[in-house]
Image (spheres, grey):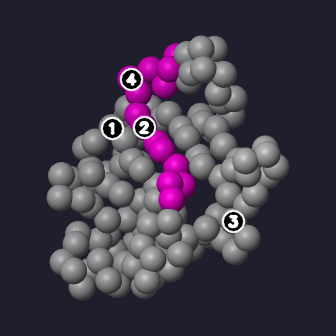
Amino acid sequence: MKRVTGIGGIFFNANDAPALQAWYKRHLGIAIQEWGGAAFDWTDGEGKPVAGTTAWSINSAQSNQFAPSTAPFMVNYRVEDLHALVKTLREEGCNVLEKIDDSEYGKFGWVIDPEGNKVELWQPPAGQ
């Protein structure tokens, strides 16, 4: 079974999220959307779109999105079979959170690494 197949997103908190979003937009040219981040569509070597996107966003430091972790960031990893991986991680003694979300955006699960960081596992919908 393949485990992680790529990075689906990078999320981090900021003390002044709007100001930091504006900085990234102005200085690095990241097209910040209303939801506080950007979606980077994947392309091949010639710049043609291929199935896949990497999300990037800045949240308020007051957000509890990364709880129970106290880290100011979370990485989202793409996986092929979320349920199989979660089962395997539990069998290996990992701290896997009970909740699994299944939505139009795919399936999401979470594990806490040995340093206490919340790690998001994402099985994208078919075709992504």
Q: Mark 3 = which residue?
A: 128
Is residue 3 placed above or below 38 in the rendered structure?
below
Numbered disc in front, either 3 or 4: 3
User: Sequence-wise, which precedes: disc 4 or disc 1?
Assistant: 4
Left or right of 9 on screen, residue 42: right
User: Can you give x and y, in whole percent of width and height, for residue 89 in the image?
Assistant: 29, 77
Please identify the dominant SS of the magenta region: strand
SS of the residue under disc 1: loop
Q: Please report the bounds of the magenta region as a residue range.
A: 6-20
Marks 1/3 in contact by CB < 8 Å: the verdict is: no
Q: Mark 4 = which residue?
A: 15
Marks 1/2 in contact by CB < 8 Å: the verdict is: yes
Tag 2: Cα neighbours inside 10 Å, few (<14), some, or many (≥20)? some
Write the residue at 40% across / 79% down: 85
User: Sequence-wise, which precedes: disc 2 or disc 3?
Assistant: 2
Tag 1: Cα neighbours inside 10 Å, few (<14), some, or many (≥20)? many
Q: Mark 2 = which residue?
A: 12
Numbered disc in front, either 1 or 3: 3
Numbered disc in front, either 2 or 4: 2
Q: Looking at the picture, which amino acid does disc 1 mark?
A: Pro
Write the residue at 59% across / 14% down: 27
User: Sequence-wise, which precedes: disc 1 or disc 3?
Assistant: 1
Q: Mark 1 = which residue?
A: 72
